[in-house]
Image (cartoon, rainbow, N blue to C red):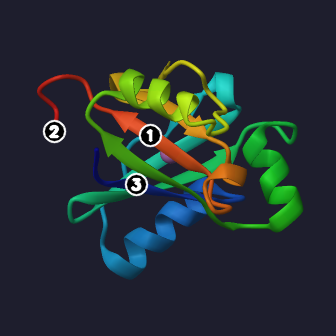
Amino acid sequence: MLKKIYHLGYAVEDLDAAARLYREYFGVVTGEPEEVEEQGVIATMFDVGESKIELVQPTRPDSPVGKFLAAKGEGFHHVAFQVEDLEVILKELKENGVELIDDVPHVGAGGVRVAFLHPQGMLGVLTELVELPRGKG
Ligand code: CO
């Protein structure tokens, strides 16, 4: 059901500085930053073996990540699990009374489909489910 940890999301104040830190310290290759207007963020990723780190900077203070930063400062923000069939899993979770942030998947960067689960029902951890386009993992 959960295929792997797809990425860990870090909330950062300054995306360029955060990406540079990982490039300088660990020699990672960071992707082109992508803005997701709907969520009020700009994000970049880099590979760590089979998983990734996603660096997320808010583009406005009232976005969810903007509020997170204001309340808690920089740090770990969410875990993203890759799943096989997002719609089926969302339906099952809903039937089990799990509190969903997204009832239906959103299409994110690179054509991936994503949905968030509320941290309250997930042991305090904001949880993202990711389904890749067919043929991509
Ligand atoms: Co994410």
Say few, some or many: other residues with alpha carbon within 10 Å of mark 3 (under 14 / 14 to 19 / 20 or more). many
Three-letter amino acid code of the residue under disc 2: Gly
- Tell me which corner region of the image, top left, top right, bottom left or bottom right, holds residue 118: top right
Mark 3 Cβ and ligand 1 under 8 Å apart: yes
Location of the C terminus by quadrant is: top left
Residue 108 seen from this side: no
Location of the N terminus by quadrant is: top left
Question: SS of the residue at dot 2?
Answer: loop
Could you tell which of marks 3 and 2 lies nearer the N-terminus?
3
Residue ID for mark 2 = 137
Between 30 and 41, the one lying in front of the other is 41
Residue 16 coordinates in the image, percent (x, y): 56, 56
Residue ID for mark 3 = 7
Q: How many labels does the image show?
A: 3
Say few, some or many: other residues with alpha carbon within 10 Å of mark 2 (under 14 / 14 to 19 / 20 or more). few
Above or below residue 58? Residue 71 is below
Three-letter amino acid code of the residue under disc 1: Leu
Say few, some or many: other residues with alpha carbon within 10 Å of mark 1 (under 14 / 14 to 19 / 20 or more). many
Image point (40%, 21%), residue name? 87
Residue ID for mark 1 = 129
> Distance from label 1 to label 3 (Cα)?
10 Å
> Distance from label 3 to label 2 (Cα)?
14 Å
Residue 53 coordinates in the image, percent (x, y): 42, 59
